[in-house]
Image: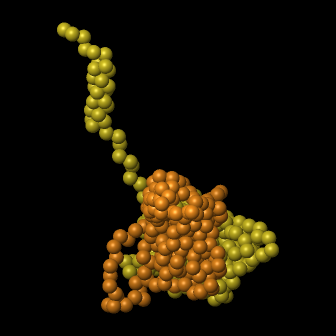
Amino acid sequence: MFRPLQSWNFILTLLVAIVLLPSAAVQAAELAFNHGWIRAMPPGANMSAAYGVLINTGKTDQTLVKVAVEGFSKAEIHRSTTHQGMVHMVPQPNLTVPAGQEVALTPGGYHMMLMEPQTAFAPGQSRSLTLTFADGQTISVQVPVQTGPSGGMDHGTMDHGTMNHEMGGNHKPDAMIHGH
Amino acid sequence: MTRIPRSLRVALIVTLLMLGVTVVRVLYPPAPPTPPVGYSVALPGGPRTLEGLSLIDQHGQTLGPEWFRGHWTLVFFGYTFCPDICPNTLYLMAETLRLLAETAADIPVKGLFISVDPNRDTPAKLAEYVTHFHPDLVAATGQRAQVDTATKLFGSPYIIHPPHAGDSDNYAVSHVSSVYFVDPQARLVGSLAELKESVDIQKALATLRQSAPAP
């Protein structure tokens, strides 16, 4: 008769699984996407771009293979590339973040091209952004819609009197390009 | 005297060498990087007239060389179906206009977005597009021949790539990402590549204004 709790093999397997499970969680925690933002676009625009910094604090290279943004039908990784003095976008099937390094997605460089917005998107809103990596890991983060990189607040139309100004770390992602 | 052991001899020689290198580096430090001389944005060959320019602005009005007189103009070539470079550059141009309005209101500066994609960028679409970034931005385009004249005058080539299969309105466009500077005498006087922040545009404009040749 099968008596699991009396089987050392079973207990051992269970223990190994319990030990491995948190390390899988730790593995996911070694990948992060920080300072993400989606560019607010003019009305009628059928596309936009998302930027941010991919951070790999783990010991193995990680390859981003898919991106998705809530409210857009499609999202792809692109790279604005200069050739013969002219710039154009080159689709990137994937984007590798080497172990211990960061890759910044910034205007004029790597970016996520977001297509066919299903709903209007404007500064003050945020969208869920999901990144899928080659080993199946995913990261989901809430990303704000902004008019520009550094907080992108149109001060001209803001009522500063009602605001709680907590502006820490006005981070400029384009100062942090480490990856290729 | 006992011979110094070989390993100790080697260690001593290496240490002395390293000490020597350190002394030399302290006495003769490497020269610090030369600070940039200032923005070299002036057009090689001097200012160029815009004679022959003929475009249609976002209100359907003709826009020619006369439009540029009396103010400095930042000019950028692009297209609206552009998710990265174009909105970013227009954002930076708009930011520059806002800052200059605050800090240098006596020097009129305008911004002009020229679309190289009249097939998709109608004047109405352009009006909607540029005013999102700044209410005073002007946009213009034209028939293909007019666009080509404009890009030749500015030295700003572009390519309309073949459309993707099955969708004649889905095609890529290559264009130059520089911002061009036209002086109040309607002459092209400079361009700025490698634009990163709006302060780059401000500095370039300041440099060009200082060295503005007499009309």
Residue at left offset 35%, top offset 46%: B32
B78 to the left or right of B165 = left
Q: Tell me: residue B3, above or below residue B84.
A: above
Residue A91, percent across and down?
A: 65, 64
Residue B55, can we see it? Answer: no
Outermost residue toward the top?
B1
Q: Tell me: residue B146, above or below residue B195.
A: below
Residue at left offset 72%, top offset 68%: B160
Residue B64, percent across and down?
A: 64, 79
Q: Nearer the viewer, residue B62 or A159?
A: A159
Outermost residue toward the front?
A1
Task: Tell me the shade of chain A.
Answer: orange
Residue at left offset 59%, top offset 82%: A71
Labels in figure, total: 0
Outermost residue toward the left?
B1
Residue B66, percent across and down?
A: 60, 80
Residue A138, can we see it? Answer: yes
Q: Quadrant of the N terminus of chain A?
A: bottom right
- Based on the displayed image, in which of its 4 quarters is residue B46 positioned? bottom right
Residue at left offset 80%, top offset 74%: B166
Q: Tell me: residue B15, above or below residue A170.
A: above
Q: Nearer the viewer, residue A115 or B177?
A: A115
What colouring style does the render use? by chain
Q: Quadrant of the C terminus of chain A?
A: bottom right
Chain letter, colour yellow in render: B
A176 to the left or right of A93 = left
Q: Nearer the viewer, residue A127 or B91?
A: A127
